[in-house]
Amino acid sequence: MKRSGAFIYLPIAFALIFISGIWIGKFIGRNNIHRSFASRTDKINGIIDYVQDQYVDTVNREKLVDKTIADMLQELDPHSAYMTAEERKRMNEPLEGNFEGIGVEFNILSDTIRVMNVITGGPSENTGLHAGDRIVFVDGKPFTGKHIDNSTVMKTLRGKGGTKVKISVKRPGTKDLATFEITRGTVPIYSIDAAYMLKGDVGYIKLSRFAATSFDEYLQSFKKLKANGMKKLILDLRGNGGGYLNIAVSLADEFLTKGQMIVYTKGRSVRHGGEKFIASTTGEFENNPLMVLIDENSASASEIIAGAIQDNDRGLIIGRRSFGKGLVQQERELPDGSAFRLTIARYYTPSGRCIQRPYDKGSEEYFQEEYDRFKKGELENADSIKFLASQKFTTPKGKVVYGGGGIMPDIFVPLDTTERNHDVNELLFHNLVKDFALEYADSKREEFQKKGFPHFRDTFDGFALLPPLLDYASKQGHWKGTKLAKDPEAFLANYLKATIARVVWNEESFYEIYNQKDKTIARALLETSKSN
């Protein structure tokens, strides 16, 4: 097809328009930009001043500054970061161990807020509000419908301690609404998800984070288990992304004898040049058998624990290679309540290895590595994991360990891909198991609670609920009627049973059932049977 002359010259015309725009801008702004930088050595502020003064549209200086600082810190490493005041508050709450609100865990189902759990020690605990209640009015106004989402609920129910909120709920089995006036206050956030006797003299503790209260919570759980005859311990750090360094050091000290190295740091500045953390005499579990469970989401403080136990030949590390975060951040608050976290040092395990994995290809690729591990088969086969010879170290007893990319467990337990096929993942992704469990638990709550958790744990058949679960999923458009294979069926039945237990009782009840089919737990129990 023959092109017209006008079409041929269009690119030239656009180029001239572009160039003329640049020259016009230069002519108009030449004097202003020179004045802006004449007495300044601060390029960032100079440019922002100029943008605010000369840019064609109105700009929000505060947002521009926030974005500039965030991008600058991100260029340093994946863990140096800037936070606005609101982001900082939200990120620090889990580590501080509390926040202010009414103290309930909730789920939104069919445009209605359902109370999943009333948090122990929170403001709602003694008001009469309980799990299963549906919140329909807040301060006399309807609080249901499609406009209700998690963000809206938290903004409405959280608030400054001492303020009041009136909540009206519909309770299953009753006609009238029940109304509660709750004074907002401190709501504890717990780090221990479960602490119970797993089998015989073997205790189990699931620690989800290293927060300000985590060590005290551990001591309370430890004393409870010890009183119940615990002589061996399985410490589950799977999925634990870390937290405070000092809390990790205190916990490691419980397992190591006096004088043993826990961790040390090295930094460039004089102030953060290096610090050593050595075990004291205060440990209460220094000689008994210990198993530490880790996976690809165990990071930072979790890796300090695992590295200290492994490098001192103190216990067995079981699971999959950990995340690989060996950088230490320090937080600095700014006058407006915002803050930044700057990497000031690297930490090293007792054998001298830094387990920080490379980040020279950028943050996006760095945080995508878990998916890359899955694609390469590393989560299913230990032989797929490669370490550099230069990162080879040995423990006092001659065991070979590696740095440069997470903690490699002593006993590798592969990810079981047979039980989590596409059908199961579809049900979990759309929260259909949780939603169905909530509906079912509401109808059976009083019956289950009357008989007690041990009766439910030992007699309830999760397989019997699979047909109604799949029928429920089909009505929601997320099940096409294909039959589940044997392994996914067994996983789903156990997971459904555990989820019902969580709704009726608590988080610990979930793990007490879920762990019965957990292959990493099974391997840890096998190893405890070999130890004295």
Image (spheres, helix red, strand yellow):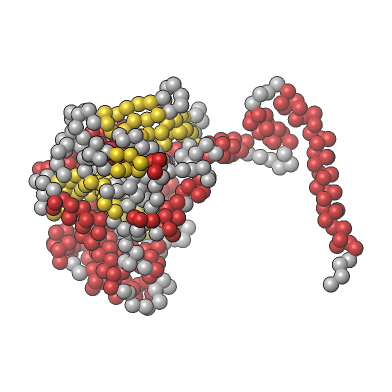
Residue 226 can be seen in this image: yes
Residue 138 can be seen in this image: no
The image quadrant that residue 47 belongs to is top right
Residue at point 18%, 52% (across, down): 527
Residue 374 in the image, given as x and y percentages of width and height: 41, 58
Give the answer, above or below, for where 135 lies relative to 427.
above
* Nearest the eye: 410 or 123: 410
Quadrant that contains the N terminus: bottom right
* Nearest the eye: 41 or 338: 41
Residue at point 29%, 75% (across, down): 467
Decide if residue 502 is on the left or right side of residue 154: left
Residue 385 in the image, given as x and y percentages of width and height: 38, 52
Residue 202 in the image, given as x and y percentages of width and height: 14, 49
The image quadrant that residue 466 belongs to is bottom left
Residue at point 33%, 39% (across, down): 393
Residue 209 in the image, given as x and y percentages of width and height: 32, 43
* Nearest the eye: 72 or 62: 72
